Amino acid sequence: MRRIITIFLTVALSFQVLFAKNEEVDFVQLAALLLKDGYIDRAYETLEQVDLNSSTLDKPYFYMLKGLVLTKKGEYKNANEQFYKSIELNKDINATKPIYLYIAQNSFQLKDYSTTIKALDKVPEIVEKKPKLQSLKAECFWKLDKKNEAFNTLDHLLQKYPNYISAYKQRFYYFITLQLYQSALEDANNYLKKAKPNETIMLNFINALRKSGQIDRAIELAEKAKINYNNSAKIIVMLAHLYIDKGMIHSAADLFNQASVYNPKYTKEAAEMYRRAKDYVMALMKNAQMLNTKEKYKQRIAIFLEFGDFERVIASRSALERNGLLDDENMRYALAYAYYMEGEFDKTEELLSTLTKPELFKKATELRVKIEQCKENIWECDL
């Protein structure tokens, strides 16, 4: 219904514009109405019908309008050509100032960063009042590899608008690129002091430090984040990965355990980390909490094998069969190995004979050699 009303009003207004006193069509004003209501293609087609030789045509306005239409169409280069024509013909300097902002915007889209800066320099008083434009200018300098100018622009911005926190985030990534990690961490902390809590940005900061190899600084930031976002499984898991990077496996396991309270999908990781930390009691406890039966048994068998509890591996055979896990050759080899370690060589051979994968076939051959050694001399048996 709203769309019908909008179309009706547009048509009604169009008729008012279409017929002036001399009954000539005012295509420029009609195009302006169509643009305002979002009919971009129709606005463009209407402007194409304008008589450029008309003595009554406001050419600066016409070219400005055409530039706007082309901008909406994504034809940024053509749009800027129209904007420059409008500026050239316009005697009112103040009227041209907003046009330079459109040129800057379009030039940035075209990755023509030099032109973006030149356009912004035409309206310094506007740029000075709008932090976002100063941030844009800094980014252009950065893209042009003019790093000093980029930092100077952001420094000036933050001096005048210290609460424009996006500039801290922008500068953080510049510092990371230049491997100035302490400065990057300071900007991250400055951002966090002033910003509203934002888990995603926090994770981005931490991850940027991690990717740069600054694990200790990333941990410092992640531990602060864990305090501020104590219910965030993602933050806890990020800190866990950082501890893994440092080789602190048991600490990572404890963090995965915490994360699993807020999101059960981390239960498997918690059990795996406890297994790697050789804390088999906790590993089995977390494994028991898993909901996916197949994944649970796969992991449980791995824990039993590492713990050396081969009897429990064998005792799990019926459960493995029931869940279709013995269709997996890796699981059949694991069970065969458990039988071997318990001295049940016939059952070991029964399972080994079903293996076809090259890497498992090789392991089966090696295990058969050990079985023969066991049969010939119990003291050579590797059990």
Image (cartoon, rainbow, N blue to C red):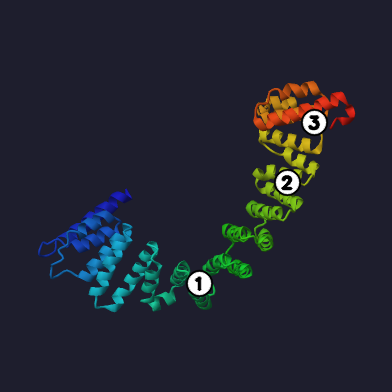
Q: Alpha-carbon distance for marks 3 and 1?
A: 63 Å
Q: Quadrant of residue 71?
A: bottom left
Residue matched to label 1: 147
Viewer-nearest residue: 247 or 48: 247
- Mark in front: 1 vs 2: 1
Q: Is residue 243 above or below residue 290?
A: below
Q: Earlier in the sequence, mark 1 or mark 2?
A: 1
Residue that mark 3 sits on:
312
Give the percent coordinates (x, y) of residue 262: 66, 48
**Label 1 element class:** helix
Which of marks 2 and 3 precedes in the sequence? Answer: 2
Residue underneath mark 2: 273
Which residue type does callout 2 highlight? Met
Q: Position of residue 283 (x, y in %)?
A: 76, 42
Quadrant into which the C terminus falls: top right
Q: CA distance from mark 1 to mark 2?
A: 43 Å
Query: Is label 3 in a helix, a strand or a loop?
Result: helix
